Amino acid sequence: MYRDAWRWGLTLQTYVQLTMLEQHTRPQTSPVRLMERSIHSARYVFVENLYRSGKMPEVDYVVLSEWFNWIGRNLDVHVDLIVYLRTNPENCYQRLKKRCREEEKVIPLEYLRAIHHLYEEWLIAGDRFSVAAPVLVIEADHDMEKMLEVLEQNRNQILAPENRKRGP
């Protein structure tokens, strides 16, 4: 997809939307369901990025958007809280290079900057799309030890709905 987004963008995002839908709607067996991403971030960040960057034809964008809207009207894909691990794109890029995953070697820094901008636009500025839940912003430009400490400090707010502050 990173090498030829025009060709593979719709295919990938259709599959992502399907797998996210499966995660959102599967029977819940524990009091909390944690997801790395959601159907909402797939639409408002990744699909949006493909379209805005000119790597997705308008017709594909409209089809994915209509499917997303139908899903939202007809199925329960709500989320109770969005935890935004806010990290600058340069730090993300360094972490990506350090992981040294073959499929990530082709991801340019500009792509990460665009994704970061869309997360900021959606979750912080609220410019174009509605936010599906309260947003907890956690600054995540720290090493792993510090991040574990920060996450522990926010544990109750993340895991216990009655302890959450309402609103972004």
Image: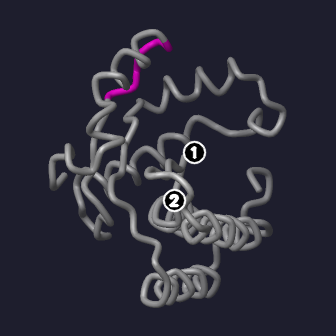
According to the picture, the residue beneath numbered tag 1 turns out to be 111
Residue found at the far left of this picture = 166
- Disc 1 packing (10 Å; few <14; some 14–19; many ≥20): some
Total marks in image:
2
Left or right: residue 53 versus residue 77 is right
Q: Earlier in the sequence, mark 2 or mark 1?
A: 2
Q: Is residue 106 above or below residue 74?
A: above
Question: In the image, which residues are magenta?
Answer: 139-144
Instruction: Check disc 2 and report its element: helix, strand or loop.
Output: loop
Q: CA distance from mark 2 to mark 1?
A: 19 Å
In x, y percent, where is residue 153? 28, 23
Q: Look at the image and tell me whether residue 53 can be seen.
A: no
- 118 left or right of 124 in image: right
Q: Please tell me which residue lies in front, 113 or 21.
A: 21
Residue displayed at 39% across by 62% down? 79
Foreground: 8 or 135?
Answer: 135
Q: Main secondary structure of the magenta part?
A: loop
Q: Which residue is mark 2?
A: 38
SS type, badge 1: helix
Residue 61 image-quadrant placement = bottom right
Where the N terminus falls, by quadrant? bottom right
Residue 55 to residue 143: above or below? below
Residue that lies at the very extreme toward the right in this rendered image: 102
Q: Nearer the viewer, mark 2 or mark 1?
A: 2
